[in-house]
Image (cartoon, rainbow, N blue to C red):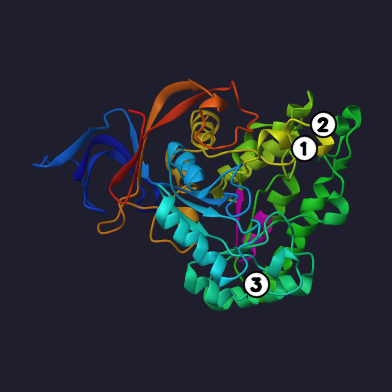
Amino acid sequence: MDILIKQGRIIDPANNFDGIADLLIQGEKISAVKSTLRPRSKVKVINAKGMWVVPGLIDLHCHLRDPGDPEEETIASGSASAAAGGFTSIACMANTKPPIDNPAMVKYVKDKAAAEAKINVFPIGAVTKGLLGAELTEMGRMIEEGARAFSDDGRPVTNSGMMRHALEYARQFGVVIISHCEDPALAEGGQMNEGYFSTILGLKGIPALAEEIMVSRDLMLAKEFKGHLHIAHVSTEKSVDLIRKAKDKGVKVTAETCPHYFTLTEEALLKYDTNAKVNPPLRSERDVKAILRGLADGTIDVIATDHAPHKLEKKKVEFQAAATGLVGFETALSLVVTELIDKKILTRKEAFAKMTVNPARILNLHKGAFKEGWDADVTIIDPLAEAVVDASQFLSKSKNTPFNGRKVKGQVAYTIVSGKIVYSNA
């Protein structure tokens, strides 16, 4: 059935539009966006007055644990969780068990998603076989099966020669290398950000330099060998500065951060909350302010979730033994509304550009905009709806979030994928 979304605030950064209008979906495609459209017969009308209507949110960095850890997440449960968070497209990282490092594994994810997922799922292939950093994967054949980018996320590509070859090889196919920037020797054994709080808590620290050294190296490689570099989960002030300067010099680099890096500091660990143990670690207040500046001035292009589900048994242990990562699909949007839009760090168009058109362009997707004939992926948001985060209600199989109990604003009313309502909270 066709859908007519009436009198919502259409926020479409790709077309530089922010205003009240109607949006018509016919079948699976966007048909029209006009100031007023008359309902036709057999059209479902959604009254969106007072709501924001944005191109379907896109998350270019998440972990679905399939194959390997179905107790923590599956493509079915992860996509349901993402839909509840307003995401219509997600890109899943390759560090599964076994990793997505060959064409057959890419096909497995695509086929499983086609059968089970509520939303679009795009596999990210591994840069190196087995994530071991020793031999490049068959990128061309993996792209043919549906890989949209390449990353050894969870591990850095420590060999500079290998990273060079990855950038050069990916450049031939017009795809991006997503870098997990971490010097393992500096980060080894670390539990949190290195500094005053790691000292008083008696935990081994991970210096900011562990990230910044690899950011610097990868920027130099990208400058020299012209590949498209995307830097994942930026967390430090110096990383932001390095990326900003590289962009000014014409380096083809994009970057992302995650909601936890602009909302939380290392002080979230003062009670040894393992749900706030992430990689890279939560940083200092000064770093958080730098991340906010980087978002505001465009240095940071994308807001991603780095959704990393873990079962309770991996988190409810002593801090040093706990897994790193948090679930992010169902809190990302409200944190963006609460902490960035409402506090006027970003305008609506700036914020949603980082969750729609920017990730779409990086992944070479024909999504992230309201264009006639494009897939009808739409997220409708009630910007005034307030809620208290309740992890027990998450659709994700895992509940590991440091935001449980936090008051937030901005809730998903509808998530629409290819003209089909896949989530409704209206």
Q: Residue at x 87, y 31 (%)?
A: 196
> Disc 2 marks which residue?
318
Q: Please tell me which residue lies in front, 123 or 285.
A: 123
Q: Please tell me which residue lies in front, 368 or 63.
A: 63
Residue at far left of view: 41
Q: How far apart are marks 3 and 1 (CA)?
A: 33 Å
Q: Is mark 2 on a helix, strand or loop?
A: loop
Please provide the residue range marked out in magenta. Answer: 243-256
In the rendered image, which quarter contains the C terminus? top left
- Whether 249 is among the magenta residues is yes
Left or right for 19, reference 111: left
Task: Return the x and y of residue 42 as percentages of the image width and height.
Answer: 11, 42
Task: Return the x and y of residue 241 as percentages of the image width and height.
Answer: 70, 51
Is tag 3's residue or tag 1's residue first in the polypeptide sequence?
3
Is tag 2's residue or tag 3's residue first in the polypeptide sequence?
3
Q: What residue type is labelled 2?
A: Glu
Q: How far apart are marks 1 and 2 (CA)?
A: 6 Å
Left or right for 253, reference 31: right
> Disc 1 marks which residue?
322
